[in-house]
Image (cartoon, rainbow, N blue to C red):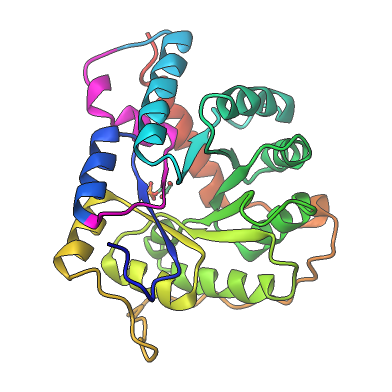
Amino acid sequence: MKPGRLKTKIFLDSGDPQETREALRLLRFLDGQTTNPSLISRNPETAGKKFTKAELLEFYKGVVQEISRLIPRGSVSIEVYADKGTSAQDMLKQGREMFSWIPNAHIKFPTTKEGLRAAHQAIQGGIRVNMTLVFSQQQAAAVYAATKGARRGDVFVSPFVGRLDERGENGMSLIENILKMYKTGDGHVEVLTASVRSVNHLLAAIHLRSSIVTCPLRILREWTEKGLETPSDDFAYCAETLKRIPYEEIDLRGDWPAFDISHPLTDIGLEQFSADWKSLYV
Ligand code: G3P
């Protein structure tokens, strides 16, 4: 059962409905699930199989429909295929189709110029979005500006903390910075802490009041073993030797194309998602 004082929504980061069942068994609640091309490529049912493009999409659809039935009141994120040549129109077309698969979808677009353009139009068309591969405050500002006018709950921004940690930067400090920056805005974007590597990340996300945190099953299992502990008010996140990311003063009233959204980890992440997805092709 969800601890009473826990306001942060807890999502599972997985492309496997069996793990959704296991997370529900362990936690007795689950507020949502995030999927992506790499997670789908690790679904046990894809082992040793090759698909045509159409078959692969049909497989993805079946997976998210099963997850959606398991957590009908939660949110399920579905990611469009994108590489560096994919246009906003192409992403939008995929997003529209995917949004029709289940009633509780958020569509994941990469936080690139084309991805932001697609999200900007998606929001106007009533499609909920989850902006992924976020590694900087400027990218989070661009997400805010590109989705202005959306209702709270319709836009998630997903900073990847673990991947920042892995290159020596304190990923949780980016969450702190984005939350601080968003306090100067209208609150329409929810921060979804992603790329979680430890229960410590999970507790820090709760302590910072990240709206959502998505975790692999092994972290949820570890958290269950710790009795679903929640951080005390004086919780101090220990980032050890990781370098704190400095806070930038950013005016959220800027036009979204004006923000500097380039980040090497976004490019690497996009390439990885694309490679994992294509590894399933015939
Ligand atoms: O949902 C996407 C995000 O959580 C990815 O995490 O483990 O691939 O860095 P990871």
Image point (39%, 13%), residue name: 281
| Apparent side of residue 235 relative to residue 78 in the rendered image (left or right) | left
Q: Is residue 117 above or below residue 192?
A: above
Residue 204, located in which quarter of the rendered image?
Answer: bottom left
Asked if one can make out residue 259 in the rendered structure from this viewpoint, the answer is yes
Q: Confirm whether the magenta stretch covers residue 40.
A: yes
| Apparent side of residue 158 relative to residue 19 in the rendered image (left or right) | right
Residue 10, located in which quarter of the rendered image?
Answer: bottom left
User: Residue 260: image x %, image y %?
Assistant: 73, 57
Q: Confirm whether the magenta stretch covers residue 212.
A: no
Q: Quadrant of the N terminus?
A: bottom left
The foreground one among 86 and 23 is 23
Q: Is residue 94 above or below residue 28?
A: above
Image point (61%, 32%), residue name: 84
- Magenta residues, as a range? 27-49
The foreground one among 26 and 197 is 26
Q: Is residue 209 above or below residue 268?
A: below
Image point (66%, 43%), residue name: 112
